[in-house]
Amino acid sequence: MNDARVRARLMVLAAFCRAHASRLLARLAALGRGPLPVPPEEIDLDPDTVLELRREGAFARASAARYESTAEMARQHADLSSAWVCELNRTEEQDRARELLALAEGALAAVRRESQAVAAPADS
């Protein structure tokens, strides 16, 4: 990143995420659980799950918009600490929305490829 403000913001967000992950792993370790398993790259999702991913993605987008307006209101009332927290939450919700919608689109693309593969041998 060339812009120092963007670079600084990304560094703060990255530190926040690392600290959050560290706390979660510490809680898991305290409960006698190890690190969570990593799921495979390709997973099959049923249409109901894809629909729920889309719904949750839309909800995350709406939450991000609410956090943005709340942050603006906090700034107007000179509550910069609350505005900062709202901005962090807004960014997190935007990221969550992007990820959920990408998962839903990826699942739909996989279903389309699968249906095309099944239809292709019948056509030849």
Image (spheres, grey):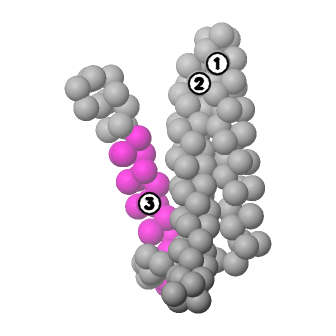
Residue carrying label 1: 72
Report if residue 22 lies within the magenta region. Answer: yes
Residue type at mark 3? Ala
Distance from the alpha carbon under mark 2 to that under mark 3? 23 Å
Q: Residue furthest left?
A: 2
Q: Is residue 16 above or below residue 88?
A: below
**Quadrant position of residue 29:** bottom left
Distance from the alpha carbon under mark 3 to that under mark 1? 28 Å
Pointer 2 with pointer 3, Cβ within 8 A? no
Does the image show residue 81? yes
Instruction: Tell me the magenta residue range.
Output: 13-33
Point 64% across, 18% down: residue: 72
Q: 4 and 107: which one is in front?
A: 107
Distance from the alpha carbon under mark 1 to that under mark 2? 7 Å
Determine whether the residue tagged by mark 3 lies in a helix, strand or loop: helix
Question: Which is more foreground, mark 3 or mark 1?
Answer: 1
Q: Position of residue 83 (x, y in %)?
A: 59, 24
Point 69% across, 67% down: residue: 50
Please give the label number shown on residue 119. none
From the image, which quarter does the N terminus lie in? top left
Residue type at mark 1? Glu
Determine whether the residue tagged by mark 2 lies in a helix, strand or loop: helix
Residue carrying label 2: 83
Please give the label number shown on residue 21. 3
The mark nearer the N terminus, 2 or 3, is 3
Pointer 1 with pointer 2, Cβ within 8 A? yes
Does the image show residue 85? no
Q: 28 and 91: which one is in front?
A: 91
Q: Is residue 9 above or below residue 92?
A: above
